[in-house]
Amino acid sequence: MTETLDVTDRTRLRRSRERGHFDRDTINTILDAQPMCSVGYIIDGRPFVTPTLQWREGNHVYWHGSSASRALRNSRDAEVSLSVAILDGFVLARSGMHHSVNSRSVTLFGTAVKVENPDEKLAKLRRFVEGLFPGRYERLRPDHAQDLKATMVLGMEISEGSAKIREGGPIDEEPDYALPIWAGVIPVHTQVGAPIADSRNIEGVPIPEHVTAFRL
């Protein structure tokens, strides 16, 4: 039986409660499906949101950026929120009021903790690259000490949060179903295109399988 996160005042859904999910399996599946995220934090009493990439390791989620980043420096040991969202379709109803979208999203709350140990930080960054492109890290030139110094990795335990999923067709008011108006769903899918080689690649360098087989 999958573990379920406790429902808190910040994660409780006030409306459309049937779309809320608090089990780790659902939350983890959405996090693993969408590396792009937004991190919200407070600087000098004002709210900011920064887009970045996230990756999950067990019951923790991580993100990284420049050590000089004001966003990351102010997020360290501070309360933050992290969210991901996947758009699955536009839902067209018979009234403007009931138009919607099919989507999967996760919102997490917690304290961002800096990964201090250099070996642990290197392992986290390797896991980040390998999670997207299996087998790539071993092909890269070794990281310089300055590379690691210039990079900050923050992590947060997945202990407070929820997923929200909307799927299916439009839900109209009963009298509106008799109206001669088309309603339905326009599906949306993420599509990965063909790789585009860097113009400065050495001639004859083959395209590795982790590039040709890349999928989200």
Image (cartoon, rainbow, N blue to C red):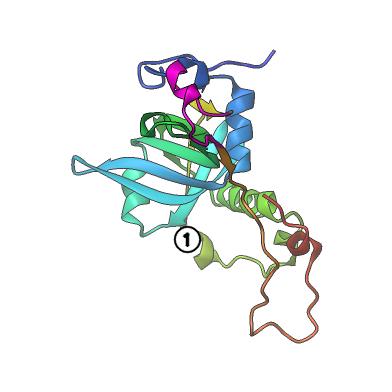
Q: Quadrant of residue 107?
A: top left
Q: Residue at x 69, y 53 (%)?
A: 130
Q: Is residue 161 visible?
A: no
Left or right position of 83 against 58:
left
Residue named by callout 1: 149
- Residue 176 falls inside the magenta stretch: yes
Where 120 sits versus 7, above or below? below
Where 112 sits versus 141, above or below? above
In percent of width and height, residue 75 lies at 35, 43
Looking at this view, is 58 or 183 the one in front? 183
Q: Is residue 151 visible?
A: yes
Q: Quadrant of residue 89?
A: top right
Looking at this view, is 179 or 132 the one in front? 179
Range of residues picked out in magenta: 169-184
Main SS, magenta region, reads loop
Q: Residue at x 47, y 32 (%)?
A: 93
Looking at this view, is 186 or 211 the one in front? 186
Looking at this view, is 109 or 112 the one in front? 109
